[in-house]
Amino acid sequence: MVRGPQTTMSDDRKPYPFRDFEPKWQARWDSEKTFRTAGPGDEGFDPAKPKYYVLDMFPYPSGAGLHVGHPEGYTATDIIGRYKRMNGFNVLHPMGYDSFGLPAEQYAIKTGQHPAVTTAANIENFRRQLKSLGFAYDWDREIATTDPDYVRWTQWIFLLLYSSYFDAESNRARPVAELEAKGWTRDQIDAERLAYVADTPVWWSPDLGTVLANEEIEEWKSKGHTVERRPLRQWMLRITKYAQRLIDELDGLDWPEGIKLLQKNWIGRSEGATVEFQVSSVQSSAKGDDSPAENSHKVEVFTTRPDTLFGATYMVLAPEHPLVAKITTPAQQAAVEAYRKTCASKSDLERGDLNKDKSGVFTGAHAINPVNGAEIPVWIADYVMMGYGTGAIMAVPAHDERDFEFAQKFGLPVIQVLAGKNAGETPALPYCDPGIAINSGFLDGLATADAKAKMIDWLETNGKGKRRIQFKLRDWLFSRQRYWGEPFPIVWKDGHHRAIADSELPLLAPPLEDYKPSGTPDPLLNKATEWVQLPDGSIRETNTMPQWAGSCWYYLRYCDPSNKDRFISKEAEQYWSGKGASTGMVDLYVGGTEHAVLHLLYARFWHKVLFDLGHVGTPEPFQKLVNQGLILGEDGQKMSKSRGNVVNPDDVVREYGADALRLYEMFMGPLEQVKPWQMKGVEGVSRFLARVWRIAFEEASDGSHQVSAKIKDTECTDKELLRIVHETIKKTGEDIEKLSFNTAISQMMICTNAFTQAEVVPLKEFIQFLTVLNPFAPHLTEEIHERVAAITGRRSSLLSETSWPTYDPAALVRNEIEIVVQVNGKLRERLTVARDADEEMVKSLALQSPKVLEHTDGKTIRKIIFVPGKLLNIVAA
RNA sequence: GCCGCCGUGGCGGAAUGGUAGACGCCACGGACUUAAAAUCCGUUGAGGGGCAACCCUCGUGGGGGUUCGAGUCCCCCCGGCGGCACCA
């Protein structure tokens, strides 16, 4: 007997032939454009259909390809999208690529290959991988942020920001043309634009050859890059004007509270007051003679605790504060200069973790406390930062930990002006909680909140200060010196910038010979000398935009991806925004937490500007946000190349099929939760799918699959089976709505087990089950459906184009139910009774039960609690 | 340090204040097979008792509380993960 070939065959045999039918269905969906979405203006568009916009965070197409974290969120949205489609919604479920980015440029540095080439190859690989998972995307809407057609509108939106200002009165953006009409000068207008140029100290990375936004520093440092502080002329976006709205308008959003809080903390609103101090010092005479001259300046500080003003015992300026040079006395000159130098050269690391020790130097100057006339010394110290508040503080060591530490170190006086909340309490210093004011003149006896209010009134009445709301959020550093990003559509002449004409968009960067950073903060595009120099003597802006630019508005472009005249048509924008039922355009947005404060804040900001200027109809982009949890390696550690615990989706698809991968990722646990990968779990769901396959087919001796003889096109007479099927229809639908995919799958497994055990598998109910499973395992269910439905001789449509089945409430009802009997809350007996058994009935049965009597024996029954259909609790003592 | 999230079998996890451990994995037993794989049928929280059907006790990080009844609600503590971190 020759057994060799057979053995080989069985080694290769899979529990069901997914390798045959998965690619087949993918090809069919592709060629038939099964999941094409018709929007306004498209053929077949039905404006009466309700819309549902479900969005994934689009990937950066790295050379490494998809990892298993991508399909987690993508499968979740795919299930929702397919489910909503079956429920009559016009579903927009698009995919694209966030394709500007550093790796392609780094590769260009090494090889000289244009980043566009690398990017195109990576996108192709991502597309292949995404298609191999059977996602129901409308591929006609695919976009990449590097597409010239897309870059055009990114630049167009930038110019919109450039040509707008924030009107404080109406609390929204308006065109700068209004200011021109009012006769404002060019410089005045430039100082108000939402996109503006400023010389600011920025973080510059020599090895990346670019500056970075505050928000990005950590990420790049953790990847081993260095950053240093440099004053540079940069493009900024005036996001701070939106700080209050970015906080307030979170309220209407259906986002996880944790993410909302993260954004609120990032924006960092503080209420307090500015206080004006008179600072004077003795300077050498400007005339060069020996007579010393007294000079005097006003210094403003910001404080959240104006109620402690009587306790201010010194003042601290940031080392970079412009007044430092003017007020330092000759005697302190050398020390101050030396200290400022150290601060300027301090690396980020030294300022942060390693050096929390307070340091500082006395300037020799003194300030007058406006509330009591006390003369206090003025110091400089790097624990006060130029970028926040006014860059100066009043120090109240008795009631601020940092000030206390500083005062201890330098022997500065401490004056307590706050007692504890309760009379007679003497709290240890520093005491920072609310309390009762003491040693504070007109504030004495007031609780902190009242004292604050009274002090602010006093300051405002006496012209010594003002109420002030301060945010931690800084304006967004928007320019980079790299190559692979959108060039700014700006030219310079005679030191002034201006926008290029819309007709010149997109403005694309020319290819370079050499993509290596210069080692200086000069933009890489400066190397393209011919491109930079314009015939009329203007020169091009050579900075490029950060990667965030493209991802700030991609969800809008999906709605109208090939529009040549606008970034999105009015009609598409209105339709996909919905009928004003919610404040956000996208109904569901799924992605990782890593974007909680960057992408999600930037995109909200751009959207609000577009809203203010009438280009979109909702104030927010994303109505509901869900954060998928990280998938860890089998070892419970974060997946990483160096740990060798990375799971490649391609391998899983090859071994178990796309449906099994999809099912497994949804079955692992709650979507939001962090959870470890288990290949055994993939086998488990693969077995489940194989069971579904075997309900439908019997394997003939030649290895072919015949529709099972158990499947019959008859009415379902098995009441219990019918009940389970309808329960499954109900629960799966409800669970999908709740994004509780793991429990939905568990119910479908129960249903599968019931079918497996049934003598007869009624065709109608089996197809209902396949329909419910279809959003999860689209390939398998289409394949089974096509072949099984054929036994009726009727032509069947695609399962994914049918409607979600409705369950029959009558089928859910059981005739007999189990009632649990407890004595004093402990389970003692189970009674099987008629569905509608009343309390009296159950009570009498329970009180006859020997098991119950055993526990009530010799006790008095005090109370009986009856929960209909569920439980009876006898309280006895 | 501050803020947020989370602690349930050997593992992933399930439980509108109402039967803790659904479903799956692992493990074990049985059927089929010359054998194995696959498949099908069972058992499977811990401890104890019974020939047995079964029964008892304990059990959701720890301690207290509210309640007829707590994994679920409240207070305190412990442990893990994530974010922010001199923001005045």
Image (tube, rainbow, N blue to C red):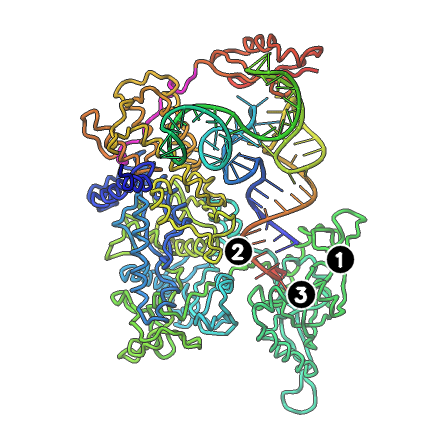
> Pointer 3 indicates a residue of which chain?
A
What is the CA distance from the residue labelled 1 to the residue labelled 3? 17 Å
Residue sitting nearer the eye, A464 or B58: B58
Q: Give the quadrant of the C terminus of chain A.
A: top right
Which amino acid type is marked by label 2? Trp
Residue sitting nearer the eye, A416 or A533: A533
Q: Residue at x 20, y 41 (%)?
A: A44
What is the CA distance from the residue labelled 3 to the residue labelled 2? 24 Å
Work out whether residue A620 can be spotted.
Answer: no
Classify 10 Å Cα crowding around label 1: few (below 14), some (14-19), many (20 and above): some
Image position, residue A786 (x, y; %): 24, 32
Image position of A665 (left or right of A797): right
Q: Badge 3 is on which residue?
A: A394
Q: Secondary structure at mark 1?
A: loop
> Pointer 1 indicates a residue of which chain?
A
Image position, residue A700 (x, y; %): 25, 30
Precedes in sequence: disc 2 or disc 1: 2
Marker disc for residue A616: none
Q: Badge 2 is on which residue?
A: A266
Find the magenta span and give its range. Answer: A799-814
Marker disc for residue A429: 1
Precedes in sequence: disc 3 or disc 2: 2
Looking at the rendered structure, the number of numbered marks drawn on it comes to: 3
Q: Are marks 2 and 1 in contact (CB under 8 Å)?
A: no
Check the image and report above or below for A668 versus A238: above
Viewer-nearest of labels 3 and 2? Answer: 2
Image position of A843 (left or right of A684): right
Q: Secondary structure at mark 3?
A: strand
Residue sitting nearer the eye, B84 or A723: A723
Image position of A755 (left or right of A138): right
